[in-house]
Amino acid sequence: MTKSTLNGRVAIITGASSGIGRASAIKLAQEGAKVGLIDLKEDKAEALKGELEQLGSQVVLAEADIKNPDRIKSAIDKVVEEFGRLDIVFANAGINGKVAPIEDITPDEWDMTLHTNLKGTFLTTKYAVPHMKKAGGSIIITSSINGNRKFSAVGMSAYSASKAGQMALGKMAALELSHYKIRVNIICPGAIETNIGENTFKEEENLKKVRIPVIYPEGSQPLEHKPGTPDQVAELVYFLASDASSHISGTEVFIDGASTLL
């Protein structure tokens, strides 16, 4: 598929050092992209940088907290200063945050989830756009089935609200940025084998008072009978980053093995 090659294009990925971000960085590098890795976990990102360089990719590493305007702007500018352009933005960084009944989530815990997931996506998009206006490109946002096609994850009100907000932001941006030939699409993963659980803080005892059992007839993963993999999501990211999706914008893509159709 010569049409979908990424040779010479520059991609930035937030939350790049593990899970979906890591798999996508490897995939985009394999397809010829130069890659900017933006992450808080510099040790893991440094190891990934070496792996991508072994694949022949040029890589810039920038440490940033995506909810901090100055830090994320500086990180994006650093990548553009090195490579001279920006074509692909994968706004992937996020957390599950506090999982608890609404009455038990503190305002600070709510803010942490919303600021990381929603504000972080806004800031990443905001500071990338000026660099993308000249030649256009693709912005891909990692949202979720939660808050968009699934509402049975009791205790995840903050997370689901942030993911619904990302969906709305992505669709608004798709129309607004179409003038500059910038496409914006939203991916909605279901259960994927990642380490996002490290940023999940559950109050199991309190959740008992609001939990509503969801009983599936024959398991919760109809297509493959198991969670998806980061590599499967990376293939979707590559498609949306490439010219193969040149007429697709403002679209959400659920990648959940049909689990939310039960």
Image (tube, grey):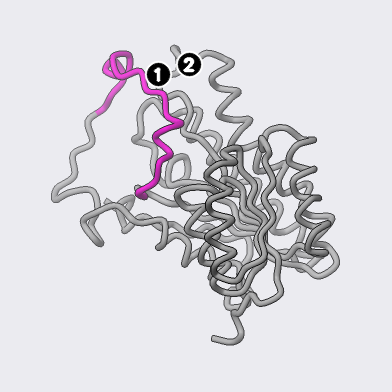
Which residue is more in the foreground, 76 or 163? 76
Circle 2 packing at 10 Å, graded few (<14), some (14-19), many (20+), is some
Query: SS for tag 2?
Result: loop
- Residue 136 location (% of width, % of height): 77, 68
Residue 130 to residue 145: above or below: below
- Residue 239 location (% of width, % of height): 53, 70
Which residue is more in the foreground, 68 or 64? 64
**Residue pointed to by mark 2:** 105
In-image side of 103 versus 73 (left or right): left
Can residue 152 be found in the magenta stretch? no
Residue at point 61%, 85% (across, down)? 3
Mark 1 and mark 2 residues within 8 Å of each other at the beta carbon: yes
In-image side of 102 versus 164 (left or right): left
**Which three-letter amino acid code belongs to the residue tagged 2?**
Ile
Residue 205 to residue 79: above or below: above
Q: Which residues are magenta?
A: 192-212
Residue at point 53%, 33% (across, down)? 161
Residue at point 50%, 35% (across, down)? 95
In-image side of 37 versus 148 (left or right): right
**Which three-letter amino acid code belongs to the residue tagged 1?**
Pro
- Residue 34 location (% of width, % of height): 67, 66
Query: SS for tag 1?
Result: loop
